[in-house]
Image: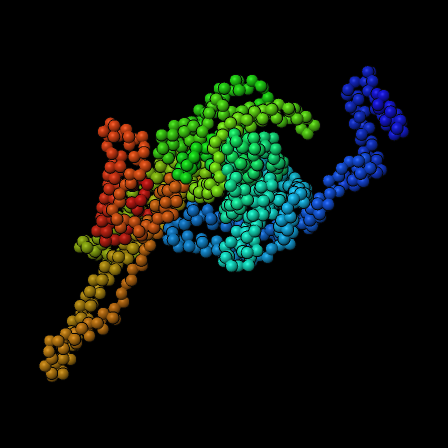
Amino acid sequence: MDAVKKVAKKLNLTKSYILLKDKQMNDATFVKNLHKTVKHVVENTQVKMQIEQMADIAHELGVLVDEDCPECQTAKTNADAITGKIKHIPKYKDTHLPLHGEIWKKLTFLEKEDYRLRKVGNQNIEMYKSDLHKEKEELRKEQNLYDLSEAMTCFISAISIPGIERSYFLKWMRMNLDNLSRQKLSGLREGYKNKKKSSENKEEIKEIDRQLSNSSLGIEHFFREMGQIYEASVSLPESSPSRQQFKHLPRLCAGLLLDGFPLELVDGDASNIPLRWVTDVLSQLNDLVSPKSKLLVVTVLGVQSTGKSTLLNTMFGVQFAVSSGRCTRGAFMLLIKVNENVKKELNCDFMLIIDTEGLKSPELAQLDNSYEHDNELATLVVGLSDITIINIAMENSTEMKDILQIVVHAFLRMKEVGKKPRCQFVHQNVADVSAPEKNLRERELLLEQLNEMTQAAARMEKKEENKSFTDVMEYNPATGNQYIPGLWNGSPPMAPVNAGYSEAVYELKKNVIQILVSSANDILEFTEWIRSLWNAVKHENFIFSFRNSLVADAYMRLCTEFNKWEWEFKKEMYSWTNDAEIKISNFGKVKSEVSDIEQLDSELQLTDLKCDACLELSKWERKLLENLDKYFKQTEGQLVEAYREDFANSAKSLRREMESSVHNQLTVATDIRKGMVEIDKIKVNHTKEGEKRVGALIEECHKKKVDMTDKKLDEEFDKMWNKMVKEQVLYKQETMDVIGNVFYYLRNNLSHKGSHVCQLLSKTKLQDCGKMPFKVSAEGFFNSTFYRLSKYFNWKDHVMVLQQIADGIIMDCSQFVKEKKGKKKQLPQHFHPGDPTHD
């Protein structure tokens, strides 16, 4: 109290400026008086100023001001020169950052399509790939037509200045851009909340997501543009001035990475890695630090807004963005230099921290490709890491388990995953210190669920030796769980920070470091790992589109059932069409039918058969749809309820395809029958014409009254015959792309078999197959447990069994082709030996 009186006297404060709480006043009354006084002061203060204008007062009070530093002032000027011209963010990005926008997204689509071939249909595979490459080249040319914008020129120039000025510049840029984006994003997020209330607003939500992406502008967008400028330049010839102009960019970015600035690994807006840019940056980083290039990779994976960035920031003292209002999606990596005392323990020089954003984000939750985006990202970062911290908040543990199941499933399918990923579960917002003991049953239940999912995935992939989650990922249930209390004691923003949070995070850090001992790789190995793993992810064409492995398994079983119904449909219609063709071909061959043929128009007969075909097709379509309805009423069918409409559309599409095929075959059969009648007429007419011309030739020879030798007669006959043949109009049959058709059905049938199979198909040319006898390779079997056991128990040699199966399949296919060839008629497009149920 004495201190307050002293200050009041020094500042000449009257009693009206001082609020005192005596013993008679309760807390509620005191708070009410305090609110009233503060409100009065704020509303009636005449002198108001911005914080920046208080610098002079700070100087008088001896407070240091960052802006007084010349480097800070220059950096602020450079940042304001760029951000000051931003009036409309989407237009600014289109004008000043054009390369990483729509062109980059189109390149991403073409790049993935080159691996997955989802839209190839029955086109020639080599021609289709060639067209994709030409489109990519055209897009790169389009990128190279753009001049370097003024904004990018200033940005590259500013980050090229080493030292503290570059740090100030990036800080000012971040603050300025966050302020600009926040103004626009708040309104869009409010619109999203309103649309989310209705499940019928999917298209409108897509539009809001597009606007959120377009209205978000951060430093990462400038670095994305840098990456695309570089990737476009390396598509030019080595001697090109543009290529020479930008070849220093990877080294520049490597320097930033070494200084502790994050680099975007995965562009979340395009769901792609600018592979050439990232690998060249890491290559330059290796040159800068070599020979001290050993690193350990730590990743945190979690659902959006669960505190994963805060967790990394607390563990490693870094500054990943933690605002839930950010729209940037993807993965960022940040390099931390290891202290000398820790370096000996970890046997590494650096730690690379990967932070992911966007998993299960509300903006993406209702979009068609949301599962694919999250599952691709999660599989990639887990595969790249020496240890993955799985961040689970109690309210969203189901979503995190779903993603983890897909990651496990993807690893089972991808041959390239040569190491066993390690994981550590972090359970957030668990306040009780006795949580580890109390949650023992919950941990056991989590492991049981993950084991169940792993077994379902292993059954699908025919890899049933993987019976538990720990067969695929390294995880110790006893030590692999950490319980962390909430960051705040109460509700922010006024709540104090919970001291127990930092203590728990420190314990987690010690545990992670202990797990990481002696597992480092060098930077170049990590770079090659990015390249091979990303190629494997791009080849994966099936599993990423599902919520979890149980849904994927149920979908596969539904596909199997649907294929059986489809095959029955096709087989019955094939049999019906055969009978109809026989009926058409027999018209006129039996005497009793001759008069009918003469009286009935063949076109009318064809129309009747087409009507009968439509009735038969409708019957089988109804049966197929009824089978689907029965399946979806089962318990298993409920897992794939979301795909009901897709399968119903497939049934309707099959009916249309079959209808077109049957009608074409009936038309062809009728035309063939008409053609046979026409051929008979042609034969009669040609015989008459031949006799007539031979008679004319003989008469002409007689008129010459010259004895002609046999040779001369032959010459005259050949001349007459050749002239007669040339006058005939011959039918030319259209050629079919057999290789293209076979490849189309082969890809369809093997599309669910994983990325490795897709890669093998992409590298295979069917026209080169079958030239040598097929032999099953023994590679891999001699190292397998099964092979050793088979030798011990005198079981059949596994290689021999597989060779017998392969020989049987080849023999069946050869016999099938031989039978169809013997019938001397065109095989319908829809009937092929490559059908999954006809193998």
Residue 87 visible at all: no
Name the quadrant of the C terminus.
Answer: top left
In the image shown, does 264 or 295 lie closer to the viewer?
295
| 673 or 245: nearer the viewer | 245
Quarter of the image containing the N terminus? Answer: top right
Residue drawn at point x = 43 percent, y = 33 percent: 420
Q: Is residue 651 above or below residue 549?
A: below
Residue 151 at x, y percent in the picture: 64, 52
Q: What colouring does the structure picture have?
A: rainbow
Q: Is residue 242 visible?
A: yes
| 74 left or right of 471 in image | right
Give left or right: position of 607 versus 352.
left
Q: Nearer the viewer, residue 763 or 329?
A: 763
Residue 712 drawn above or below residue 276? below
Residue 208 lies in quadrant: top right
Q: Position of residue 591 (x, y in %)?
A: 17, 55
